Structures are given as structure tokens and as C-alpha cells.
Amino acid sequence: MVMVSKYIMCSLYFKGLSDPYCRFRLGNEKYKTKACKETLSPQWKEQFDLKIFPDSPMMLEVTVWDRDIRKDEFMGR
């Protein structure tokens, strides 16, 4: 799986920028992209190798978070 994004997100802060990253899960496996600093148009360009088994149905769950000093904040799913 290759994580690539180039779309405009809504900012969570008055300053107008976020440090977005994605968390995703497939079955029991969890993955996370690097945070893109101060942007609303992230471009991760990262590749992940997922373990997919044909005899067990799995759902890929992707969430977007804003990296913060105190606590990361949920931006969307």
C-alpha cells in the first residue's frame, strides 16, 4: 500500500496549519505515517507492506491526526 495524499484539510487551530499524519489498521496490524509539518495539503509518499490473508475478511481503517506537543488530535476518518 502506498500512502499519497494531496488535498486541502480543515485546520484545527486559529493559526491555520496542522502537522497531519495517518494511522491505519488492517486486522491486528497497525501502521503510522510520518507527520507533515505545518501544512493542510500533506504528501506522505510512504509505502507499507500489509499482510493480507485471503481466507479472513479484513477492513482497512484509516484515520488522520494532527501531531501536537501535548496530545495528538483526531482530524478525520
Image: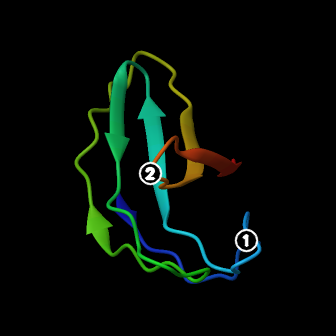
- What residue appears at the point 37 percent right and 18 percent down from the top-left corner? 28
**Residue 8 or residue 60, whichever sits in front:** 8
- What residue appears at the point 35 percent right and 56 percent down from the top-left corner? 33
**Residue 40, located in which quarter of the rendered image?**
bottom right
- What residue appears at the point 50 percent right and 79 percent down from the top-left corner? 38
Q: Is residue 62 above or below residue 33?
A: above
**Residue 28 or residue 69, whichever sits in front:** 69
Q: Position of residue 8 (x, y in %)?
A: 69, 82
Crowd band around label 2 with a 10 angstrom C-alpha radius: few (<14), some (14–19), many (20+): few
The answer for how far apart the CA atoms under marks 2 and 1 are is 16 Å
Q: Quadrant of the N terminus?
A: bottom left
Amino acid type, residue under disc 2 in the picture: Ile
Q: Which residue is mark 2?
A: 69
Count of numbered circles on the image: 2
Q: Position of residue 73 (x, y in %)?
A: 61, 46
Q: Is residue 12 left or right of residue 67?
A: right
| Mark 2 or mark 1, whichever is nearer to me | 2
Q: Is residue 8 above or below residue 28?
A: below
Q: Secondary structure at mark 1?
A: loop
Q: Which mark is residue 58?
A: none
